[in-house]
Amino acid sequence: MRVCLPLLLCCATALAAPEPPKQYSLDGVRNDLARSFTLPAALPLDPALRSAADEISAAHIARIQALLPAWLEEENQFNNATGKQAQTWEPYVAVWARMLNELGLWQLEPGDAAYESATLAILRGSTPFCNLYSDARASDYAARIARIQTLPAAQRPAMLAAERELLAHWGKPRATLPAWPQPLPQDAALRLIKTGKPAARPALTPVLASELLGERKPYQDLPQAEQCLLQQWWFKYSLQQGVAPATALNAYRYGTMINVTERLAGMVDQPPAAASGAPVFPTLAARFLAHGASIIEVQLDANGKLQQASMAERKVEVPGIRGVRPVAFETLFDQSALQYAADHPQIQPAGKNPYKFQLLWTMPEAPK
């Protein structure tokens, strides 16, 4: 992981020692799983839909919780087979990472043709579904059931059956998922809103207009409901611009996926900037022993000032996740990488604009 790719022009390596988490049981994993499948009491659902959805989630929670000891044993066997001298807590964190990534894979995976068609119709429509009355860090299932609530009652059983089938894919090999949209929907939407002419885009809701144009809030500071509304707004705009429905729906799913940074927000503090100017290794990445590389594309203006920095490619590896992309963890290093790009325009090679460079994120041996 320390070798620069030929197309890249600069490399940097960030090092950080992981802080061992106090995790020596599967209880936390079980609790996180159950929390993501709890439907808030305040969520306005028809009784029949709520009952059916609760039945599906209860069966899924029971199945995955029963699998967790086998996943733990799989980690121990993998470490033994590879000769890794893992600390006692590492297999538990690996199982936690695997469960969190299953949540991400589930959020991105398409359903059957009927499910996709119905989902497109929901997003194209005007019936509200963004107010979930739940913790934004664990609103996965609530968001899906709230969308189904907008459909006529006759269509709901088929959608619930598709949801049950998608949940059955947990812990099994998956089809290859589409790549990350470039740029992310929220970034593209904000760029259009801030730089485009109002006549060239659909009208914003009064709340979004106030928060984005008046208060100039960044996307991550918007309440969950407004983030959802912005994603739906960009989805509709994309279709108006001729984007294929499947491509627009994929972008919506990536834009609304709860990644690990969002899901565990508030759990750890980001370390301060290094005096050396080295990239900041995210504490959350250290907790999961994640490592990899970020390829950043930078565009400077005529004065050599940063005009735009964006993620061109992500390569992330996380213990416990094998055979599938670590989609829930792939953005772990984005904030640190983009901040480093903004702070170091001097790495620009002469005459190159835009340009790309790579940052390597490596972990030292964990403390004994």
Image (cartoon, rainbow, N blue to C red):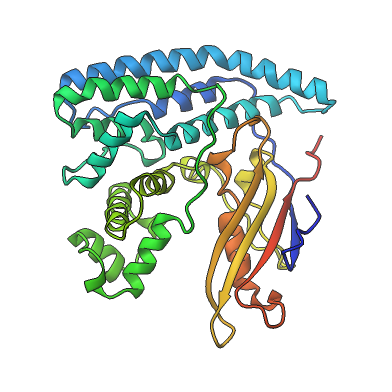
Nearest to the observer: residue 346 or residue 210 = 346
Residue beneath the point at 47% across and 28% down: 32
Residue beneath the point at 61% across and 14% down: 69
From the top left corner, tell me how far across and down residue 83 is, in percent. Answer: 85, 25
> Residue lying furthest bottom in this view?
303
- Tell me if 2 is positioned left or right of 22 in this view: right
In the image, residue 72 sits, relative to residue 247, either above or below, namely above
Nearest to the observer: residue 234 or residue 63 = 234
Q: Quadrant of residue 132?
A: top left
From the top left corner, tell me how far across and down residue 41 is, in percent. Answer: 24, 27
Residue beneath the point at 34% across and 23% down: 162
From the top left corner, tell me how far across and down residue 96 is, in percent. Answer: 58, 28
- Tell me if 149 is positioned left or right of 39 in this view: left
From the top left corner, tell me how far across and down residue 189 is, in percent. Answer: 36, 62
> Residue lying furthest right in this view?
83
Q: Quadrant of residue 133?
A: top left
Q: Quadrant of residue 208?
A: bottom left
Q: State which quarter of the image contains the C terminus.
A: top right
Nearest to the observer: residue 30 or residue 77 = 77
Tally of numbered discs: 0
Residue 244 visible, this orientation: yes
Nearest to the observer: residue 200 or residue 29 = 200
In the image, residue 132 sits, relative to residue 315, either above or below, namely above
In the image, residue 82 sits, relative to residue 293, either above or below, namely above
Residue 130 visible, this orientation: no
- Tell me if 193 is positioned left or right of 349 in this view: left
Residue beneath the point at 34% across and 72% down: 194
